[in-house]
């Protein structure tokens, strides 16, 4: 078990290094990265000034050295300055991360509360109206493009009915009306994923020998479902949590851009539009770090929940 | 009395009557993926014959006065704007371009991009899965670790960066989508090969002196092809969504070209005045992806129920 976790930990760290290095490599592969900072011949810059800037930014060094330097500074908490407004990347990220976290946590809660119980109900009451509803939702949620869902919801609830605000997360710490639409948009695909996986896991377990034995011994339905089957059915959703988390990160880019929420996702899009490469590298680091951490935690949870791994 | 007795022993499905044409029709729809296949056939047909089917030119507005023309059923709009002589079935966009024609044209480009990238991802993923599963050891370790690392990189973010640095074009979108699509194949093919290579017929082939390539290509690949097809069907929908998301964020297929993602993005500014510009292309994505997922599920249950957890 220890070696399992150790291996997962090493691969998590490697992912982090890989993703951030990719950002560096991409910026080098295409053209002179100095062009991202200063367009050739633009801004009335003389060639000498350009070269001075190159040295100041450390772009005269080899990409691996640049990366190592960046990594060293990043580990000490210094992510460099944004090109666009020369503010520290770290401050910019800290200002924005709250909104994204808020959105993420609420969407996660929404997806879990909706997806897992519905998946279990759908399996227990197989081939009933409940099951059709659950399966319908799973199909709907995994097929609907979230940017379109956002637009349709805005159209319906903000433009036509005028019930809910169509943008920002509002003032104050938590504003429920502002959260409803973005959380629904971000959470639906994840809820559908949870539902699907929980349902199929539950179906498989309800069909297994030990459940049949429990039923044969006369254990009540409630006990069979909640005590015997439920805990086992939680393992597959746990293991895919990290994959579903992926949809959160890409989803936050889109959701924040549609709802004009000033979080990390919209900051990323902004930094792309401004060719703000240090900012983008910082955001990639944060996003990947969150992802990798969740990935690792779900592995730990997996070990805790599944005794087959814990004892091996 | 006798009637009642038989009634009791009937199963619920018999109670509704198997002879009832409505029930029969419903059961038929449940057993065979008729509606999804119909939608996908329609997509394929319009995609291939786009230039001949589209009622208007997808890239050039018909009339200047047709700006944001309403869908055809809104006759009030056409009465208010008598100068607009053309009729637009699903309305027109701010440049007077027909929404339906652009959806049809977009189907073509999306189909092409997604199929090419899926084929690339499928080839690479299946190849790597075969190698990792068959050779094991160091090769397996390396491929699995690369897969692990790859799975933890936020793809849309990387796509944004590439678009910022290199600029966006159709080949780049294809490359990006191929980068997302390969990983699902590796893991499942690898797992499959791990069990297949222990089979007796593989051992026989080894004894007769067949080369590793021959065993993988001729003896193992035919046995994993079902899995590959099922995964491919399950993945197409996700790829279409990914392509549309890229286009929506402005880093996908470059603008004047009609794609479903581009169209939804273009209509965002006109939600309160011309909702149809965004609505219909999004609906098209939704229907197509839903059909694909449905078909994928159906294929999986028929061919490869072990993949159920996917």
Image: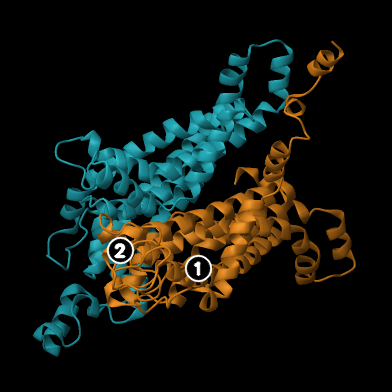
Q: Residue A239's x, y, as percent? A: 52, 40
**In terms of secondary structure, where does tag 2 sit?**
helix
**Between B119 and A101, which is closer to the camera in this rendering?**
B119
Q: Report if the CB atoms under discs 2 and 1 are less than 8 Å apart.
A: no
Residue at image point 55% right, 71% down: B47
Q: Residue B66's x, y, as percent? A: 30, 71
Query: How is the protein colored in the picture?
Result: by chain
Q: Which residue in the structure is indicated by mark 1? A: B107
Q: Name the image quarter holding residue B257.
A: bottom left
Q: Give the vertical position of B175 relative to B204 (above or below).
A: below
Looking at the image, can residue A182 be seen? yes
Identify the chain drawn in orange: B
**What's the mark number on residue A224?**
none
Q: Give the vertical position of A311 relative to B53 (above or below).
A: above
Q: Residue B3's x, y, as percent? A: 84, 16
Mark 2 on the same chain as mark 1: yes
Residue at image point 42% right, 30% down: A113
Q: Chain of mark 1?
A: B
Residue at image point 25% right, 61% down: B269
CA neighbours of label 2 inside 10 A, class few (<14), some (14 to 19), many (20+):
few
Identify the chain drawn in cyan: A
Looking at the image, can residue B155 be seen? no
Specify whether A169 is left or right of B260. left
Precedes in sequence: disc 2 or disc 1: 2
Which quadrant: the N terminus of chain B?
top right
Q: Chain of mark 2?
A: B
Q: Which residue in the structure is indicated by mark 2? A: B79
């Amino acid at each position: 078990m220890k070696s399992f976790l150790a291996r997962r930990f090493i691969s998590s760290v490697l992912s982090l290094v890989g993703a951030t290095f990719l950002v560096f490599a991409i910026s080098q592969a295409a053209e002179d990265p100095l062009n991202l900072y200063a367009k050739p011949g633009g801004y009335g810059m003389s060639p000498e000034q350009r070269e001075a800037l190159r040295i100041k930014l450390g772009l005269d060094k080899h990409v691996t050295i640049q990366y190592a330097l960046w990594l060293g500074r990043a580990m000490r908490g210094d992510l460099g300055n944004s090109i666009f407004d020369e503010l520290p990347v770290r401050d910019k990220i800290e200002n924005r991360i709250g909104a994204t976290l808020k959105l993420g946590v609420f969407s996660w809660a929404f997806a879990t509360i909706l997806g897992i119980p519905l998946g279990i109900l759908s399996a227990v009451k197989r081939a009933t109206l409940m099951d059709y509803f659950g399966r319908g939702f799973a199909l709907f949620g995994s097929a609907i493009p979230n940017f379109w869902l956002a637009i349709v919801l805005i159209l319906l609830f903000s433009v036509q009915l005028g019930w809910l605000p169509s943008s920002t997360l509002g003032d104050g710490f938590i504003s429920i009306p502002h959260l409803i639409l973005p959380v629904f948009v971000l959470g639906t695909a994840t809820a559908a994923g949870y539902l699907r996986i929980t349902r199929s896991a539950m179906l498989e377990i309800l069909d297994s020998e030990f459940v049949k034995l429990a039923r044969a011994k006369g254990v009540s339905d409630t006990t069979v479902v909640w005590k015997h089957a439920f805990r086992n059915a939680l393992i597959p959703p746990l293991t895919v949590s990290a994959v579903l988390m992926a949809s959160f990160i890409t989803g936050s880019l889109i959701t924040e851009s549609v709802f004009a929420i000033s979080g990390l996702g919209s900051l990323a899009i902004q930094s792309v539009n401004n060719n703000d490469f240090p900012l983008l590298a910082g955001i990639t680091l944060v996003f990947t770090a969150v992802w990798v951490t969740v990935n690792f935690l779900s592995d730990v949870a997996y070990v805790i929940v599944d005794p087959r791994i814990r004892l091996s | 009395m006798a009637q009642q007795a038989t009634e009791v022993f009937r199963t619920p499905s018999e109670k509704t009557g198997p002879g009832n044409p409505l029930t029969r029709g419903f059961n038929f729809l449940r057993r065979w993926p008729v509606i999804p296949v119909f939608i996908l056939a329609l997509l394929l047909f319009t995609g291939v014959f786009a230039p001949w089917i589209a009622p208007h030119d997808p890239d050039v507005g018909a009339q200047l006065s047709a700006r944001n023309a309403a869908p055809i059923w809104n006759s009030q709009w056409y009465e208010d704007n008598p100068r607009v002589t053309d009729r637009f079935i699903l309305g027109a966009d701010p440049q007077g371009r027909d929404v339906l024609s652009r959806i049809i044209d977009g189907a073509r480009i999306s189909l092409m991009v997604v199929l090419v990238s899926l084929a690339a991802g499928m080839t690479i993923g299946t190849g790597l899965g075969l190698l990792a599963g068959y050779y094991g050891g160091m090769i397996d370790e390396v491929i699995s670790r690369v897969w692990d690392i790859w799975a933890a990189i936020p793809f849309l973010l990387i796509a944004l960066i590439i678009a910022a640095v290199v600029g966006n074009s159709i080949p780049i979108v294809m490359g990006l989508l191929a980068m997302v699509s390969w990983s699902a194949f590796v893991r499942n093919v690898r797992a499959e090969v791990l069990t297949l290579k222990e089979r007796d017929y593989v051992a026989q082939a080894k004894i007769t002196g067949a080369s590793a390539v021959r065993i993988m290509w001729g003896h193992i690949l035919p046995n994993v092809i079902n899995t590959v097809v099922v995964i491919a069907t399950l993945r197409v929908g996700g790829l279409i969504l990914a392509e549309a998301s890229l286009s929506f964020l402005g880093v996908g297929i470059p603008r004047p070209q009609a794609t479903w993602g581009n169209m939804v993005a273009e209509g965002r500014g006109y939600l309160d005045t011309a909702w149809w510009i965004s609505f219909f292309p999004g609906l098209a994505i939704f229907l197509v992806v839903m059909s694909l997922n449905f078909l994928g599920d159906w294929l999986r249950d028929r061919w490869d129920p072990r993949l159920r957890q996917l």
